[in-house]
Every structure is written in structure tokens, then in C-alpha cells.
Amino acid sequence: MDLRFGIATRDTSDFVNVYADYYPDSDRLVVTYIVIYSDGRNDESFEVNDLADSEREHIIRLMNEECQNGNNGLDMTSALKKMNTEENEEVHLNEIILKNAENHIQQMGLFQPNVLNDFKGGIVNYSEEPHSILFWATDAQNEVIDMLERKGACKVWHIIKGTYVCPGGERQQIETYLLAIEEKTEFPEWNDGFSAYSYSRFLSAGPGDYGDVIIKPINGGLKRTV
């Protein structure tokens, strides 16, 4: 509480109450906290004007849950503690996924030109088939990366772009976004390559697909074989 609101009640007899009011017609959330002093000073009330989007969404979600459970109010102190716990768990999960992504880059031998350093600096590389030449991700590809990482607990660590013959003989240009997730720490070998989890984006039209693909290192980059 002290850290979040910039106050100093720890190791004192003072305490803090936090209240939230939501106005659905205007989609307005008002959060206030009251510092109650043990030395007889007048209580002080403050409105929270720097709510992060994640805090706002969390509070409204908990309010909805309490209403569905038949409760008329929300214990904001417990809610904030729960929110901090969930945020810590999310940070830990993201650290695991990021570590898995870095391990995937190393397992596939993507060391040149500085692919791992690029990734640590926020730059994703892609391999352009048929020769798997490495390039930095384009603005359009970065938009897809942002979309994928916002949708779920994953991290895009590489992209493979190429033209492939699909069932029925049709040739399709596909971008394969290789995803690091919590459950997959390394890739099992499969025939002449490795099985990797991915999102395949068909550039001609239509939605993409999630699933495993077979990849293999070639010429310093990566090639999709299945």
C-alpha cells in the first residue's frame, strides 16, 4: 500500500482503506483511499489519478465477480493484494517464456549475425526462404508480433517467410511466427528437423493457424520443411 500510494503507514498504527465506485453509463471508475491516523489527526482522503489500465481492468473484473457471487461490495485491500500476487505471477511467467525463447535461438544455432543480441534488444529476425537469409522483422511483421503477444502467454522468437505448396497443389506465401511458450523448453527432433510451436499467417487471405511445424537450421537461418 505504502509503495503504491506513496504513503508511510508501515510499522505504525495508521491504516488505509481503499474504495472504488464504477459508473457503467460513462465507463468511469473512481478509486479513492483514506489514511486513518492513530494519533488523532484528521483522516485524509485522496483520489487515485494514475490508475494503470491493468489495475483498472483488474478492479472492474473483481467487482463483476463479487456481484455475480451476490456480494454488494469489494474488499479493495484484499483486491490490491490479490492483484499484486497475480502481477508477480505474470512477471515470473514472462521471465520463463523469455528464457525459453532465448534457449530456442541458441538450440537452433542462430548466432550470426547477432540474432540473440538482437532479440535481447527487442528485435526479431526472420529467415527468407528458399535460402533462409536473415533480415530484421518489418513494421508489418512487428504488428503481428504485438498482436500475438497481447493475445496470449507467448513470445515470438523468429519468423520464417516462404512460399509453399499446400494440399490441393495451391502455392501459398506464408509467414511462420515461431512462438516460445511456458510448456515447451526445447524442441524434440522430428525426422530431419525439429518440431516447433508456431502461428502460420497466410499472406494471400484468411486467418492464421496455430500448431506445430517442422523447422531446421540452414545457412545461418531457419527453413520450414512441414
Image (cartoon, rainbow, N blue to C red):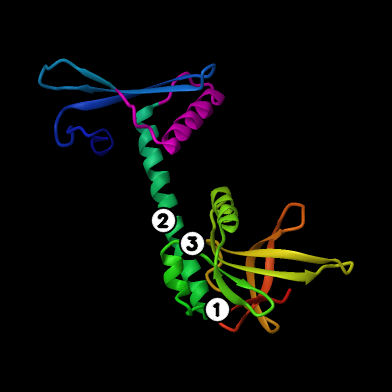
Name the residue rendered at 47%, 63% in the picture. Answer: 123
Ranked by sequence position, the earlier of labels 1 and 3 is 3
Question: Spatial distance from mark 3 to mark 2, Cα to Cα?
Answer: 9 Å
The amino acid at mark 3 is: Ile
Q: On the image, which quarter does residue 118 sit in? A: bottom left
* Quadrant into which the C terminus falls: bottom right
Q: Residue at x 34, y 31 (%)?
A: 50
The residue labelled by disc 2 is 92
- Which residue is outermost to the right? 168
Per the image, label 1 sits on a secondary structure element best described as: loop
SS for callout 2: helix
Mark with earlier residue (2, 1): 2
Q: Which residues are magenta?
A: 47-74
Q: Earlier in the sequence, mark 3 or mark 2?
A: 2
x 72%, y 77%: residue: 225
131 falls in the magenta region:
no
- Answer few, some or many: residues within 10 Å of disc 1's Cα (few below 14, many 20 plus, some between 14 and 19): some
Label drawn at residue 97? 3
Of the pair 40 and 215, the residue shown nearer to us: 215
- x, y percentage for residue 114? 45, 76
Q: Amino acid at mark 1?
A: Met
> Where residue 210 appears, x then y in whole percent?
68, 59
Give percent across and percent down for residue 126: 58, 69
Query: What residue is disc 1 on?
Result: 108
